[in-house]
Image: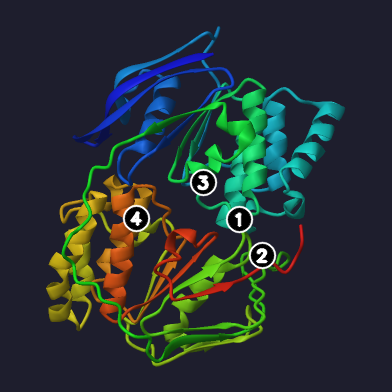
Amino acid sequence: MKLNLDTAQITISAGNSQITMPFAVKATLHNSDGLVVTGPSGSGKSSFLQAIVQYLRSSGHRPTYAVTGELVCSGLSSRPVVEYVPHDLDEFFASPNLMQEIRISLEFAGHSGTDLATNLREVIRASRLTAFVGRPLATLSSGEKRMAAIVSAICRRPDLLLLDEPDHEISSDRLPTFTRLLSHYLQSGGTAIIVTHKPRVYENYADLSGRLIRATLPSQGSSPASVPLSKPPIGDPVVHLQGGELYSDAEARYPELLFMTHGFTFSEGDVGFIEGPNGAGKTTLLRELAGIRRRRSFDAEYFSGTVTADDLRHPDDVAFVPMDPLSQMFSGTLLDNMKLAVHRSDRRKRCWRLKDKLFEILATFGIAESSKPANLSRTQRQIAAIAVFLTCPRLLLLDEPPTIADIAQQEAMRDLLRFLVTNGTTVVMAGTNMSSYSDVCTRSVTIRRRWAE
């Protein structure tokens, strides 16, 4: 297979409106080649992958995503088999069960009988998914689902594999498995295009680095110059957890664990990070903390330890921002979303005094008052959702904070966190790797799985 890419811009159609953005990528990919595309948030990387999918699977309908320039696939007798693993996996899986999902993919690739059973066992072993055999996919963590989706896509032996930030949710203990599977796919003659904020994941892996072409998109923003962000001293405790075990309620037969030996305390002025591998219960813990305003503590059905919160009683006191907060926002502009949040708050005057300073920071991410959440990238939406909380909650919970490659946007993200802390918010993030935020975090805690793989 030969794929020629020489693009100039991407056009996104939504109803009767269109958005056009520059997107200059030039590369020629052959069998066993990979293209790694990195660039600022909102530069069109995910739209680029979707434009390729729509082009190669074209059925004559007007595409939602279109590329201006050359995008030609040759060297195949028929339409290429394309597997696309998007950020949002809600509609990706063909089966609710992990084992059945991989079996379907192997059957698609032509395996049957004894050969199918042998390959199924080998794939499960090589991808370190043995602990999840027979489990419903709904009970897996986001990182575990991501790994399962990549394995399922590779098992189909596509001519072209498209991966949208595959490394973002995969914990460091699983990255070697992921890169080994990707390397094997390329060695067997496959072609891959990967968009990422972590190009070093691929550059540092010897079996991959020689097969990859890198395309870096230019920064479109500039770092804000004059936002006062002095850090206040650490104050009184806001939330405290004593060690114990946390169980997910997704499926009673498959208890997910959070095992803490010492617990934690996050205080006013803290930027905290809860770090742990896939499946350790980080998101479950944040969701429990998000409901603590109503209970003030929890220690019964899903948690064997005790969590207490100090005076978090006001509706604005606790805010939770998931990995993709689109469902939390309505279809208007970002400013409309802010107005709605502020209208519900009794802190209106204070909120609007902060708005202009906040938008100075957001401009670096290409986010403006008129931006609509549905037209933003997933990373931009997560950052915009943080900004919606002009009410500056006492406790802000951020699930899998974005990994950002662009230097100006990295600094702007740190400024956004400091901005919140300066205005009285305690920030608690949870993710697989805190290295991107180590210089701004004041406290961190590590959690681990109860079971061993």
Evaluate if marks 2 and 1 touch, with contact meaning CB atoms under 8 Å apart. yes
353 vs 58, left or right, is left
Kindly report the distance in space between the C-alpha atoms of the residues bearing marks 4 and 2: 38 Å
- Residue type highlighted by circle 4: Gln
**In the image, residue 374 above or below residue 212:** below
Tell whether 287 sits left or right of 218: right
Residue labelled with disc 2: 251
For the residue marked with disc 1, what is the amino acid? Ala
- Dot 1 and dot 3 residues touching (CB under 8 Å): no
In space, the residues marked 1 and 4 are separated at their CA atoms by: 33 Å
Residue in the image at 58% along x and 53% along y = 143
Q: Position of residue 384 (x, y in %)?
A: 28, 59
Instruction: Kindly report which numbered mark, 3 or 2, lies closer to the viewer in this rendering.
Output: 3
Q: Quadrant of residue 223?
A: bottom left
Between the residue at mark 3 and the residue at mark 2, the CA separation in whole angstroms equals 19 Å
Q: Residues within 10 Å of mark 1 (few under 14, many from 20)?
A: some
**Residue 336 can be seen in this image:** no
Q: Helix, strand or loop at disc 4? A: helix
Q: Residue 109 in the image: x percent, y percent?
A: 68, 24
Residue 109 position (above or below residue 47): above
Mark 3 element type: loop
Q: Tag 2: residue type?
A: Glu
Disc 3 target residue: 89
Q: Which residue is mark 4?
A: 410
Report if the CB atoms under discs 4 and 2 are less than 8 Å apart.
no
Q: Is 234 located above or below residue 446 in the figure?
A: below
Residue 427 visible in rendering? yes
Q: Circle 1 is placed at which residue position?
A: 138
